[in-house]
Image (cartoon, rainbow, N blue to C red):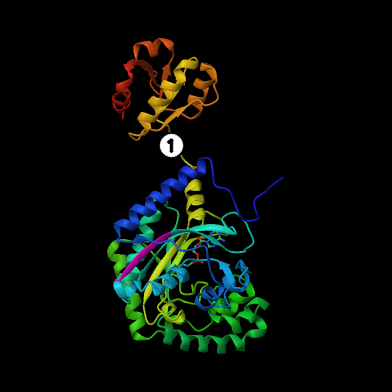
């Protein structure tokens, strides 16, 4: 039997209504913050991600879907959206034309990870990127946007964790101190951590392995290596969050898994989804534009995993929520009613009504059953008698009330119960 590719899933049925509601939230709240939607291709040159995310990261080193196309170019399915957005901003000179460029996206992404609940090989992110500002107001703005979106989806069981990596310079000083310390304790650490000391030492800090944790507990702290400007930047971000009433906890060992970050990094985490506890994350990535050959442009942003947002809302609400109900189901009695019923349906659809008709030539009884199944708000019955009079008999399904109205007054009748 034909099957989906492992780690990839179909989205349908009651879950779709939840996607539509979330997508409406993404659009309206992004717009309210002055962000414009941006769409990029699914495929990019592999080099974009190697340069942007970092060759030594899990995403690029282990998880990308990469292939050589028929022209001999190495292409990759995008594993994230920040590098493509920055590529596009450079390519279209966006920041030159608008000093602050605010963009949002809702995109399918691909990572060859080990699939489990909340972790897929094709997944989706809603995210936003604020390009062009070095100031803490931009960091706070994107965090507030993410926070408002998560709240508007109806979630409560999450918290915001935040940290600073400091400027690229203070991070480099810290990295050197950390490598010295870790090398001195190399023998006490797991094989994975030992390998990371050489490739991506900051990632050793969020190792979940017990023997590593003991070493990490006494490691030099990033906090003690921050320069004054970095501390001031971080404090200003926190003050803005305080002023906006957004609760957070400082997580001094959070470093995030991508190479482009500096200064503020943050994650929205939950305890309600088992091991897949991050529903989103982001941070400032001032180095990325120049890593991709685009000059010096500071930027900050975040992405939320849509599957995880919706899984959490399903857990919190105890289900996917209601599917949309059609306004009207037209039941026809006999052959002659079908064409006029179709015309009435078309007229009402063109003024924005959701109208369902029977296309299986079913009996009245099974059409009524179908109207119940789709939970139509009203049912109209049209037979020979109604046709002669130019009327329909309308039943309001929740109350059971019945009325007979001329064809031209169906819309008025539907509107009377809203
Ligand atoms: P990330 O932390 O790699 O950051 O991903 C953000 C979110 O995407 C995660 O917190 C998670 O909710 C979701 N996610 C990641 N992988 C999967 C997966 N395999 N299955 C389901 N959900 C997943 C980024 O991607 C950065 N581009 C965020 C950013 C934007 N930084 C600055 N701007």
Pick the residue in front: 173 or 297. 297
Residue for point 42% across, 22% down: 341
Where is residue 379? Give x, y as percent.
42, 22
The reply to whether residue 317 is visible in this rendering is no
Residue 250 falls in image quadrant: bottom left
The residue at the far right in this view is: 1
Residue for point 65% across, 54% down: 5
Above/below status of 261 relative to 173: above
Residue 360 falls in image quadrant: top right
Residue 378 falls within the magenta-colored stretch: no
Pick the residue in front: 48 or 277. 48
Residue for point 72% across, 45% down: 1
Q: Is residue 401 left or right of residue 338?
A: left
Where is residue 307? Give x, y as percent.
51, 53
Q: Which residues are magenta?
A: 98-105
The reply to whether residue 219 is visible in this rendering is yes
Quick one: label 1, few (<14), some, or many (20+) residues within 10 Å?
Answer: few
Where is residue 273? Give x, y as percent.
54, 54
Residue 179 falls in image quadrant: bottom right
Residue for point 61% across, 54% down: 8
Q: Which residue is mark 1?
A: 324
Where is residue 363? Give x, y as percent.
54, 17
Pick the residue in front: 319 or 94. 94
Q: Is residue 337 left or right of residue 192?
A: left
Label the magenta part by its dominant secondary structure: strand
């Amino acid at each position: 039997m034909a099957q989906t590719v492992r780690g990839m899933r179909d989205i349908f049925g009651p879950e779709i209504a939840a996607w539509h509601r979330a997508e409406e939230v993404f659009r309206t709240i992004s717009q309210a913050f002055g962000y414009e939607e941006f769409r990029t291709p699914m495929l990019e040159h592999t080099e974009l991600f190697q340069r942007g995310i970092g060759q030594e990261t899990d995403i690029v080193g282990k998880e990308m879907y990469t292939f050589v196309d028929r022209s001999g170019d190495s292409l990759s399915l995008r594993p994230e959206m920040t590098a493509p957005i920055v590529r596009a901003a450079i390519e279209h000179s966006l920041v030159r034309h608008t000093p602050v460029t605010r963009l949002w996206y809702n995109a399918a992404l691909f990572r060859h990870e080990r699939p489990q609940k909340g972790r897929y090989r094709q997944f989706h992110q809603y995210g936003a990127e604020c390009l062009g500002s070095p100031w803490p107001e931009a960091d706070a703005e994107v965090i507030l946007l993410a926070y408002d979106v998560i709240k508007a989806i109806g979630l409560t069981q999450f918290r915001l964790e935040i940290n600073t990596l400091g400027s690229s310079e203070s991070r480099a000083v810290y990295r050197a101190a950390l490598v010295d310390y870790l090398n001195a304790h190399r023998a006490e650490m797991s094989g994975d951590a030992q390998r990371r000391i050489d490739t991506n030492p900051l990632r050793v800090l969020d190792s979940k392995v017990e023997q590593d944790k003991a070493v990490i507990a006494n490691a030099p702290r990033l906090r003690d290596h921050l320069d004054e400007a970095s501390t001031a930047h971080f404090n200003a971000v926190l003050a803005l969050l305080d002023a906006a009433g957004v609760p957070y906890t400082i997580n001094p060992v959070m470093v995030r898994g991508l190479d482009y970050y500096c200064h503020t990094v943050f994650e929205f985490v939950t305890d309600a989804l088992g091991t897949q506890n991050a529903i989103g994350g982001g941070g400032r990535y001032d180095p990325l534009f120049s890593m991709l050959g685009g000059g010096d442009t500071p930027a900050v942003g975040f992405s939320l995993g849509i599957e995880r947002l919706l899984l959490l809302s399903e857990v919190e609400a105890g289900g996917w929520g209601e599917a949309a109900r059609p306004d009207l189901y037209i039941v026809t009695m006999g052959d002659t009613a079908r064409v006029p019923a179709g015309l009435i349906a078309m007229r009402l659809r063109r003024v924005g009504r959701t109208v369902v008709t029977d296309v299986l030539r079913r009996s009245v009884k099974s059409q009524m059953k179908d109207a119940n199944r789709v939970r139509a708000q009203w049912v109209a019955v049209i037979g020979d008698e109604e046709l002669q009079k130019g009327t329909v008999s309308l039943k309001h399904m929740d109350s059971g009330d019945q009325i007979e109205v001329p064809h031209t007054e169906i819309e008025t009748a539907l509107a009377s119960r809203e």
